[in-house]
Amino acid sequence: MTKRKVLEVNNLNLELNKTKILKDFSFDLNEGEVFAVIGPNGCGKSSLAYTLMGLNGYEEKSGEIKLNGEKINGLATNKIAQKGMTLAWQEPARYEGVTVRKFLSLGLESKGKEVNEKELAEALEEVAIVPSKYLDRKIDDTLSGGERKRIELASILLMDPDVVILDEPDSGVDVVALNNISQVIDDFREKGTGVILITHNEEMLQMADRSVLVCNGEILKRGEPEDISRYFKFECVPCEDENYQEHLEVSSLG
């Protein structure tokens, strides 16, 4: 059975401070598919995520982005989220004074759904967080990075997007949290959500159906996760492009 394409990216180009960050970047994503993007630091992976989500300062120079067949170039981030694509940040935000309950409720309200206490609890349980211990806690420095990441994923589960971008979800988390995040990725797949997985973690890379290796803002290699992982680990060499260091410095700002 042919799966529906939920995202199509064609010849995407991005410039920041007159430096090319993304170069003719093209790929597609099917419903329920996990598509991994790997590459060295500063190669443009996070910039890709920010461009897809229409963040300020990351407006593409050229190219086309289609979500569920509809062109979304130029739309504001909140409009893109309403149409079905969202981003889980590498470093989840802290919301001083905002409780976990309120934060999760916003996820439901953004989709025009009524807040249901049972749904909030079930979403937290899916990410291995005990609702009774966390619903009334504040999303601030009293929570670890791993806890905030899982709470953010619970919010995304409630939003039920067509596409979710996970920007290095394995960064700064322990083994237990990593296992929880891996389970959530499986949950997204089962629900038919397309996942763009930006990662350095070999174990998480193996969860992908397809993968690409990115270098200096362009796709260097496409293939099976195992093949891409092996190539990245044993055959990749530092980029000798004379513009690479400038590219690294500029793209790392995002």
Image (cartoon, rainbow, N blue to C red):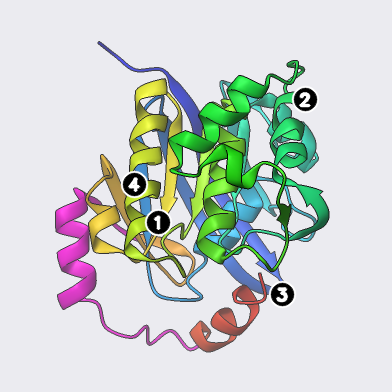
Q: Looking at the image, is mark 1 or mark 3 earlier in the sequence?
A: 3
Q: Which residues are magenta?
A: 220-242
- State the CA–CA distance, disc 4 to disc 1: 9 Å
Q: Which mark is residue 18?
A: 3
Nearest the eye: 109 or 142: 142
Residue flagged by tag 4: what amino acid is it? Ser
The nearer-to-camera label among 3 and 4 is 4
**Counting other residues with Cα less than 10 Å from the Cα at mark 1, is it few (<14), some (14-19), or many (20 or more)?**
many
Mark 2: secondary structure = helix
**Residue occupied by mark 4:** 182
Mark 3: secondary structure = loop
Residue 67 position, x and y percent, is: 59, 28
Q: Which mark is residue 159?
A: none
Tally of numbered tags: 4
Q: Is residue 99 left or right of residue 119?
A: right
Q: Is residue 194 above or below residue 252?
A: above
Q: Looking at the image, is mark 4 or mark 2 earlier in the sequence?
A: 2
Q: Looking at the image, is mark 2 or mark 1 earlier in the sequence?
A: 2
Disc 4 to disc 2: CB gap under 8 Å: no
The answer, for residue 239, to whether it is visible in the render is yes
Nearest the eye: 34 or 172: 172
Quadrant of the image containing the N terminus:
top left
Residue 93 position, x and y percent, is: 70, 59
Q: Looking at the image, is mark 3 or mark 4 earlier in the sequence?
A: 3
Residue flagged by tag 1: what amino acid is it? Ala
Disc 1 to disc 3: CB gap under 8 Å: no
The nearer-to-camera label among 2 and 1 is 1
Residue flagged by tag 3: what amino acid is it? Lys
**Residue occupied by mark 2:** 109
